[in-house]
Image: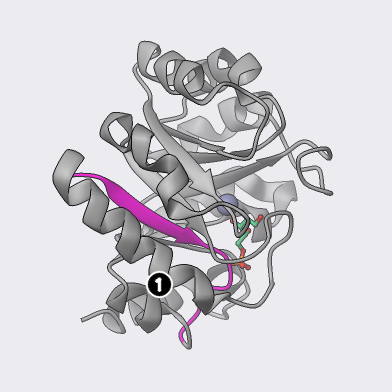
Amino acid sequence: MKIAPSLLSCDFSVMGQEIERMDKSGADYMHLDVMDGHFVPNLTFGAPVIKAVRKYTDKPFDVHLMISEPLKYIDDFADAGADIITFHYESDSDIQKTIDKIKSRGVKPGIVIKKCTDAKEIFPYLKDLYMVLVMTVEPGFGGQAFMADMLPRVGEIRREAEKVNPDLLIEVDGGINAQTITQAYEAGVDICVAGTAVFKAEDSAKAITELKNLCR
Ligand code: DX5
Ligand code: ZN
């Protein structure tokens, strides 16, 4: 299991050092939650902040856009140094155009679905994607309870991807901790985002190791 710490739970006054700390703690990706106060009822940070902290690690930046019009901002996030850009199926941008735009910038595209979206709605796009992110909380805030009823969608997406895109990565986001990660692992998830469980732990390296050890 790969772990992507969500910087949403970091100390933003020292965000660069927090990224370095996660790098040394065994993080596989850095998960950056961009919120626009419109698609979700919360605001975080945008491309300038991502650009400023890009130099603190060589690990891939997994940028999760919780914004209404992702297509408008793909260039900004590509310029900022995103390696993977995931955007919501429920956003207002044209899905295929957004995927094509991300790819045209040499960035890896991902679609995110939340509870209101059935897995099969994204099947037509799977062949073009690097990653699918399945939300296991309602997007907007860290520290919420894990929704295990989202896990069957991981299996549905995997079965379809085996036909059209066997290398597709599946990530889950929200409520991952030592009590819930085994269920994600058994559902066939490749990458788990973890905010609270990693950043609020006394020893983040130990927390990441423990999460990984639970998946075998
Ligand atoms: C929620 C964000 C998540 C969140 C995860 O909208 O996309 O990345 O920060 O935080 P935890 O692990 O605390 O649920
Ligand atoms: Zn996220």
Q: Answer with the quarter of the image where residue 145 lies.
A: bottom right
Disc 1 secondary structure class = helix
- Residue 204, horizontal then vertical, whole percent: 49, 72
- Give the residue at x 46% y 85%: 178
Residue annotated with mark 1: 208
Q: Answer with the quarter of the image where residue 199 lies.
A: bottom right
Residue 202 part of the magenta-drawn span: no
- Residue 26, horizontal then vertical, whole percent: 34, 62
Quadrant showing the C terminus: bottom left
Q: Please, which colouring scheme is shown?
A: one colour
Where does the magenta region start and end?
A: 166-178
Quadrant showing the N terminus: bottom left
- Give the residue at x 83% y 40%: 37
Residue 176 part of the magenta-drawn span: yes
Q: Nearer the viewer, residue 32 or 95?
A: 95
Residue 59 appearing in the image: no
- Residue 185, horizontal then vertical, whole percent: 31, 74
- Give the residue at x 51% y 78%: 148
The amino acid at mark 1 is Ile
